[in-house]
Amino acid sequence: MKKSLALALTSAAILFSTFTHAAKTEKAVLAGGCFWCMESDFEKLEGVTDVISGFTGGKLKNPTYNGNHKGHYEAVEITYDPAIVSYQGILDHYWVNIDPFDARGQFCDKGPSYLSAIFVQNDEQRKLAEKTKAAVVAEFPNQTVFTPILNASTFYPIKGRESFHQDYYKNNPIRYNTYRWRCGRDSRLEEIWGDRATH
């Protein structure tokens, strides 16, 4: 009886610990062109626990990659542990992984769905986003920063028959690396950010 009670208490403690840890995670939604690349760049950041590819920013419900996603940005929903990495840290990582001066898309991908954007969920996120954007503007006074700060809207994960887009860089490393190289993403990031580029 005592062993059963001890086992039950231990299981309850583990469950509670897991629940409280999960409850501490927070989310950020960012658009930076190809969501394969954004997944890859953010899953390497310490404190990030999950990155999901999808669409956001548009009015159309249930957008799809091969179908209609008009008005939406390709974006990622990042789940992170604020005890390890802050929202400020997420944003700092974001800026050095995009080209904020591109008004037509990102790298070789052009068009509205490939534009960069920060989607904020509350006043605190907006304040930090504006602060980091102002720092980029100040660092590059002769260039225009086109990355907007927008209110968060429904995030639609890629799913169903298109779910192969999730973790594409892990599941298709040769195709992914070839695409990334041909797109010139890393060379452009190094041109802008130097050794701060994190690829």
Image: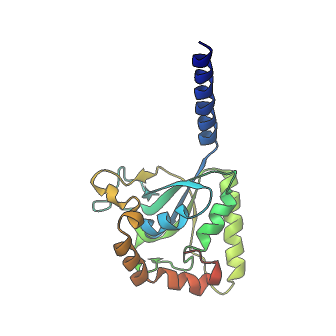
**Which one is nearer the viewer's eye here, 49 or 161?**
49
Residue 85 is drawn in which quadrant?
A: bottom right
In-front residue for pair 187/127: 187
Q: How many marks?
A: 0
Q: State the residue in front, 125 or 78.
A: 78
Q: Is residue 65 left or right of residue 154?
A: left
Residue 20 in the image: above or below residue 42: above
Picture residue at 35% right of the left edge, 68% below the top: 172
**Residue at the image position 62 percent from the left and 68 percent from the top:** 93
**Of residues 106 and 20, the one drawn nearer to the viewer in this rendering:** 20
Let me know if residue 40 appears in the view: yes
Among the 4 quarters of the image, the one containing residue 136: bottom right
Expressed as whole percent of the image width and height from the top left, the position of residue 102 reads: 51, 79
Q: Quadrant of the N terminus?
A: top right
What residue sits 62% from the left and 27% below the top? 10
Spot occupied by residue 146 in the image (x, y as percentages of width and height) = 56, 74
Question: Left or right of 156: which side holds 150?
Answer: right
Q: Is residue 151 above or below residue 195?
A: above
- Which quadrant holds the C terminus? bottom right
Residue 139 image offset from top left, x and y in percent: 71, 81
- Give left or right: position of 89 versus 170: right
Measured as percent of width and height from the top left, residue 171 is found at 36, 63
Does residue 143 lie above or below 57 as drawn? below
